Amino acid sequence: MALSSKQQRALTNAAVTAGLTALVGLVVAQVVPTDGNVATTTSPSRSPSPAVACEPRWEPVDSPDPQDGGSLLLGVAAVGPGDAWAVGGAGDPVDPTATLTIQWDGDEWDVVPSPNPGSVANRFEAVAALSSDAAWAVGRASDGFGDYPVAAEWDGGDWNLLPLPDDLTEGALMGVAAVQTDDVWAVGFRGDVEAGTERAIALHWDGADWRSAPVLPALGGGRTALVAVAATSRNDAWAVGYQRNRPVILHYDGRAWARSASDVAGDVLGVAALGPDDAWIVGERVQHWDGTGWTEAGSAPKNSMLRAVGAVATDDVWAVGDRPTEASVLRPLVQRWDGAGWQVLRGKGAPGSISVTAMSAVPDGTLLAVGYRDGPRGRATFSIRGTSCAGA
């Protein structure tokens, strides 16, 4: 979710030191072997345990790199197990010169051409999808004089740029969520992060135009930005971000955005919702909304960061991010909530320093997550596929 090199460091590469502690609150940390299976504590028994037909797990899958040394993925949206989009950038590892859109067919990712309005830099930060012919990507571009927001729509054959309100001449769009083809939200900020002038924005797509939906009355003054959004209906949407280096949560009730109070401290980077009484937020800590308030439901391991969350069902929620090793190398962090506690799942190894930036879940239990890997040959895309064994 890089807005600039400074914002990338602040919001996407936050975990830089080593260490790992037990998860707190409702989190149940599990010891996992290197083969990707979750190891749980069992009581001694003279009888063999019954065979387990399916266990939640994940594994890396190949993803393309159009330009060596500079490709990365920042957003993903799955319509079904064989239909998903991931977006990011290609070129310079900090300020990509070209947008990157790749499509999943259930077996592999393939690059699909996408527009590049900026003459210097172009990057998609997030993507939302409803069907094979309806998806939206948002991000930022630059002509060399600061960043400006961009949005594009997939019509089943091409990605096409969409006009934004005329006054959005500076800033970026960081998150997008779609309920219907005429009900899409995008969030981000206007202004310049480097200059400290960023102000949070929310835009609504009605099928024909993007229109601004005021958020500053709910936030007040000072530096603000929204970095992620989730929506379940026309009357239920959530957005998260920061105000003056403090976390902020907003809710849309069909009429206006309003601030949602939470006593849980720490950065908020990702949000997912299943309904008006079931929403999740991740960052340094995990928060759950039960329809009346936010409560802490765990945390990331020490010095780690959860960057995205996806929900298959109320008792099947996944969160992803990165955790540091003793060698200051980032490794993928994948956690799963089973309705009673969290398990930390470890998949098959992959070389390099890896950050997982986004994830998406579908009702059949398929999980797709993306990010990037830094290695000797530079920065490259990274993708994983998981299964929660829903219905097994």
Image (cartoon, rainbow, N blue to C red):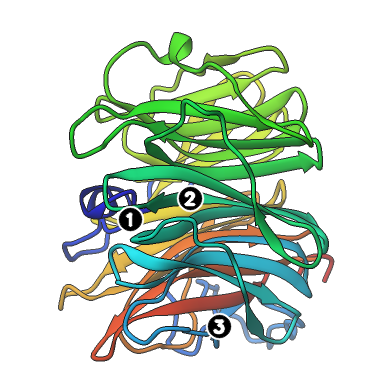
**In front of the other: label 2 or label 1?**
2
Pointer 3 local density, CA inside 10 Å: few below 14, some 14–19, many at least 20: some
The picture quadrant where one finds residue 378 is bottom left
Residue at image point 27% right, 35% down: 192
Q: From mark 2 to mark 1, how far is it between C-alphas?
A: 15 Å
Residue matched to label 1:
12
Task: Report x, y in % for residue 137.
Answer: 60, 53
Residue 255 left/right relative to 35: right
- Mark before the other along the chain sequence, 2 or 1: 1
**Relative to 45, 192 lies left or right:** left
* x, y percent for residue 2: 34, 53
The answer to whether any part of residue 285 appears in the image is: no
Q: Which residue is denoted by mark 2 in the rendering?
A: 139
Residue pointed to by mark 3: 59
**Rendering quarter of residue 93:** bottom left
Q: Amino acid at mark 1?
A: Thr
Question: Looking at numbered disc 3 in the image, what kind of residue is underneath it?
Answer: Glu
Marks 3 and 1, Cα distance to the nearest angstrom?
22 Å
